[in-house]
Amino acid sequence: MTITVKDWHRKDHPFVVGPRNPRWTPYGAIPAALKKAVVASEDANFYSHEGVDYEAIREAIKADWRKGKFVHGGSTITQQLAKNLFLTREKTLIRKVKEIVLARRLDDALSKSRILELYLNVVELGPMVYGIGSAAHYYFGKHPSALTVRECAFLASMLPGPKVYNPYRRMDRVLKRSDRILRRMVTARMITREEFDAAISEVPNLEGIARKVEKTIESPPPEEKPPEEKPPGEAPGGEPEVVESSPPAASPEPGSPPVR
């Protein structure tokens, strides 16, 4: 399958989805910490919903209604995948309805592991940097399987949009958001307290990032405003975020079902 992606000058480019892409990273080679960071960041109810989180959509509609414009999408990982594979990025009600329908179909047809594999291999993470295989090499010069917990949270922190959470222009913004993701992960017992302490003290090695970005784009794109974060104490999906040193036990991550 080949889809069309855009660079930061809004020019179209073909992008191969699947193993024929040399940077494709199969599910088994994706670090567990990266999968958990993405779920903690983007879709806390990923393993329990059927492709669409209707409560998140209701809250997004309320927020958008108050502001009089599309600000909060309420999209799950499955909805984002549907948009990336089959739809445009225009913010319209018609596109949102199509996205919901496609997300339900994807959830019926594919396992959660397959959905996550596809999502992480096509998501935008930089200037013409699509998928975690390209992102791991672009930012850290390594294969995704070698990423540290901090580096996984770092990549997950850019998912709302790499033009907004752009480490070249706003490293402080990216690190601050990755810190929040790490706190969510330790609260949900996705990582241990020891892993959290090690990750929070680690400074990602991004040597040469300015040179790489300048080579990829002649000049940085206009900076976009970051999406509004949920109020303090609220995690993705509207769940309360607790940051005590001994968080309550959480349900273990379900086993990965066979790819269909």
Image: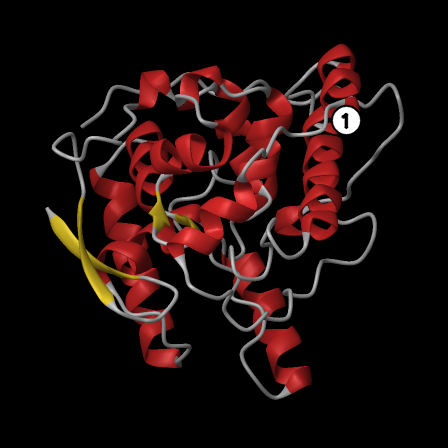
Work out whether residue 213 or residue 119 is closer to the camera in this orientation and state it: 213
Q: Give the residue type at disc 1.
A: Ile
Query: Quick check: 84 above or below 116?
Result: below
Classify residue 138 as left or right of residue 228. left
Q: Could you say where residue 212 lies in the image, as x and y percent from the top left?
A: 46, 45
Q: Residue at x 42, y 23 (%)?
A: 144
Query: Quick check: 224 above or below 119?
Result: below
Q: Could you say where residue 48 lies in the image, as x and y percent from the top left?
A: 48, 36
- Secondary structure under badge 1? helix
Tell me which corner region of the image, top left, top right, bottom left or bottom right, holds residue 208. Answer: top right
Tell me which corner region of the image, top left, top right, bottom left or bottom right, holds residue 44. Answer: top right
Classify residue 256 as left or right of residue 247. left
Q: Could you say where residue 47 lies in the image, as x and y percent from the top left?
A: 46, 33
Query: Quick check: 89 above or below 234?
Result: below
**Residue 43 seen in render:** no
Work out whether residue 146 or residue 101 is closer to the camera in this orientation and state it: 146
Q: Residue at x 63, y 57 (%)?
A: 169
Residue pointed to by mark 1 = 200
Q: Residues within 10 Å of mark 1 (few under 14, many from 20)?
A: some
**Residue 135 seen in render:** yes
Tell me which corner region of the image, top left, top right, bottom left or bottom right, holds residue 95. Answer: bottom left
Outermost bottom residue = 68
Outermost right residue = 244
Work out whether residue 255 or residue 33 is closer to the camera in this orientation and state it: 33
